[in-house]
Image: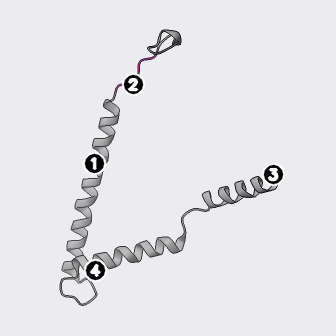
Amino acid sequence: MKLAIVALFTLISATAFAGPDPQTREMRREHRREEALQRFDHNGDGRLDREERREAKQFRREHRRERQMRRQQREQRRSQRQAPPTYANPSQAPGAR
């Protein structure tokens, strides 16, 4: 039983600290490339020419700005939340027994 627990713990920790799989990263990169070709290759030659690349860069820039703005808004909302009150004597807190 102890051996099984140790083996399970070793397996879990090894997979947790292994880092991202390079093959998976490469697959995501290829998927993004195919999506970009579908979206921006207007002449259908399978390559992005100068104008198509310019349009793709502009699209990425705009979406990056939108993500940054959403992130800033989330951080502002979080910072505006009030922290729960602290009590010197925990027995005085509402709901304390």
Amino acid type for the residue under numbered disc 4: Leu
Residue type, mark 2 in image = Ala
Residue 89 visible (yes or no): no
Earlier in the chain: of badge 3 and badge 2, it is: 3
Assign a secondary structure to mark 3: helix
Q: Is mark 1 on a helix, strand or loop?
A: helix
12 left or right, relative to 97: right
Tag nearer the camera, 4 or 3: 3
Marks 4/3: CA distance? 54 Å
Disc 4 versus disc 2: distance between alpha carbons?
Answer: 48 Å
Frontmost of labels 3 and 1 is 3
Q: Mark 2 points at which residue?
A: 83
Task: Give the residue type that dot 3 points to.
Answer: Lys
What residue does disc 3 label? 2
Give the residue at mark 4: 37
- Which residue is disc 1 drawn over? 70
Position in image of residue 95 (x %, y %): 46, 16
- Specify start and end residues of the magenta stretch as a single range: 82-86
Q: Position of residue 86 (x, y in %)?
A: 45, 16
Q: Tell me the distance, in whole angstroms, between the alpha carbons under discs 2 and 1.
A: 23 Å
Of circles 3 and 2, the one toward us is 3
Marked residue nearer the N-terminal end (3 or 1): 3
